Amino acid sequence: MSSVGREGRTGVQLLSALLLMMLMLLSGCSTMDVLVPSYITARNGTNVRIPCTFTSCYKMDLNKFHMNWTYKVADNESETEVMFMTYDRKKGMIPLTTDQFDDRVEFTGNLDKNDLSITLSNIQPEDTGFYFCHVLNPPDRIHGKGTIHVNVVNELPPPRDSTIAVAIGASVGGALALLILSMVVIKCLRRHRKQELTSEEKMEEEGKLEAEAVAEEGTK
């Protein structure tokens, strides 16, 4: 092979390798999903767990991991979020002193399982608002954020009584079953009647043939 051919082949190989590296970089795992409920209803004076977990393409590196919880009354850009819990590389998850929550916030998650949940004790009506779970897990380049709207009420709404729905469903199901059974019975009766008619017609035809045969014999 000539030197020109070898140089051309080497150039193509280098170009292919560069393209492959670019594709690997572009298709690399760089996304994160923060999983939270969108809405929580809590009864005044109770302890409420506010869950937050995340999925990442990379294992958590506690030396690079960043996380904090923030709060604000309304979910709008004009209001500033108040940080009340954060992750410290030496101390782990630590609550921050705030006028609103004081010492009522506790970390109840598990970092080994990517669980960043917290529990708010003796929740009050003024705790109603939006809670934000911020996560950054390098080398993920995405800053994950989960938003939970917590509403504090004096009494939780009673659970829906499903008895009526079950009764209606059972009645409708029974009626349908009876209708299907009736249709099957009617179809069987029609089939049986058709078979009887066919048998009678056959017997009548045979009788005619026998009468014709006797008449022919008498003629002879």
Image: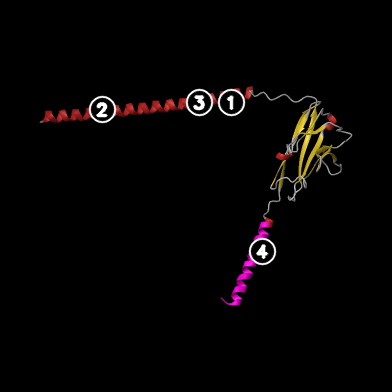
In front of the other: 180 or 196 = 180
Q: Secondary structure at mark 2?
A: helix
Q: Which residues are magenta?
A: 1-24
Residue 21: say if magenta: yes
Residue where numbered disc 4 is placed: 18
Residue most toward the right?
99
Residue that badge 1 annotates: 169
Q: Nearer the viewer, mark 4 or mark 2?
A: 4
Q: Which residue is mark 2?
A: 204
C-alpha separation, residue under disc 4 versus residue under disc 2: 94 Å
- Residue underneath mark 3: 177
Which quarter of the image is occupied by the C terminus? Answer: top left
Q: CA distance from mark 1 to mark 3?
A: 12 Å
Q: Residue at x 14, y 31 (%)?
A: 216
Which percent across, then down, holds residue 34?
73, 42
Residue 44: x and y, percent?
Answer: 81, 26
Q: Is residue 187 magenta?
A: no
Relative to 162, residue 101 above or below: below
Q: Earlier in the sequence, mark 4 or mark 2?
A: 4
Q: Which mark is residue 79?
A: none
Relative horizontal placement of residue 8, taking residue 129 as reference (left or right): left
The residue depicted at 65 percent of the width and 66 percent of the height is 15
Of 95 and 173, nearer the camera is: 95
Between disc 1 and disc 4, the foreground one is 4
99 relative position to 147: left or right: right
